[in-house]
Image: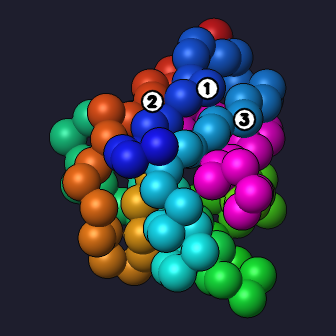
Amino acid sequence: QDQLVESGGGLVQPGQSVRLSCAGPESAFRLYTMGWYRQGRGNQRELIADLEIDGRTMYADAVKDRFTISREYGKNMMSLQMDNLKPEDTAIYYCNTAPGALYQWGQGTQVTVSS
């Protein structure tokens, strides 16, 4: 996988869960802190979670205790488990290095939380 590709989004009801996936270059997952970003309507793209090579994690206040970031080095994959979703989680979700994005942005995956 030469480029970052996000998948797994869709329409979900409040309180339900979604698991997002990110596929990318092996070097990205081996050498850098990787993170999940999101951009809601009318908002800037923001970093909401990251995972360092040593396993330490960071979560934005808006998603802490609800989202979990993880990596699968052998598969060049990263996931974001999103539990107890709220309407304010509606956004396009992207993956990249963190806290600065070193790779070209992928298309992202849309998550819409609505009753």
**How many neighbours does mark 3 have within 10 angstroms: few (below 14), some (14-19), or many (20 or more)?**
some
Indicate the amino acid at tag 1: Gly
Q: Give the CA distance from mark 2 to mark 3.
A: 11 Å
Q: Nearer the viewer, residue 5 or 51?
A: 5
Residue 95: image location, x then y, percent: 45, 53
> Label 1: which residue?
8
- State if disc 1 and disc 2 touch (CB < 8 Å): yes
**Dot 3 lies on which element?**
strand
Query: Residue 102 placed where, x, y %?
Result: 28, 70
Query: Nearer the N terminus, badge 3 or badge 1?
Result: 1
Q: Which residue is mark 3?
A: 19
Q: Amino acid at mark 3?
A: Arg
Task: Estimate the spatial distance between the alpha carbons at disc 2 and disc 1, rounded to whole Å.
Answer: 7 Å
Q: Is residue 101 left or right of residue 42?
A: right
| Whether residue 69 is situated above or below residue 12 in the rendered picture | below
Q: Is residue 89 above or below residue 18?
A: below
Label tally: 3
Callout 1 secondary element: loop
CA–CA distance in space, label 3 to label 1: 6 Å
Specify whether residue 81 is painted magenta. yes
Provide the secondary structure element on which disc 2 rests: strand
Label 1 environment density (alpha carbons within 10 Å; few <14, some 14–19, many ≥20): some
Give the residue type that dot 2 points to: Thr
The residue singled out by tag 2 in the image is 109
Q: Are marks 3 and 1 in contact (CB under 8 Å)?
A: yes
Query: Is residue 59 at all visible to an observer of this figure?
Result: yes
Answer left or right for 16 relative to 100. right
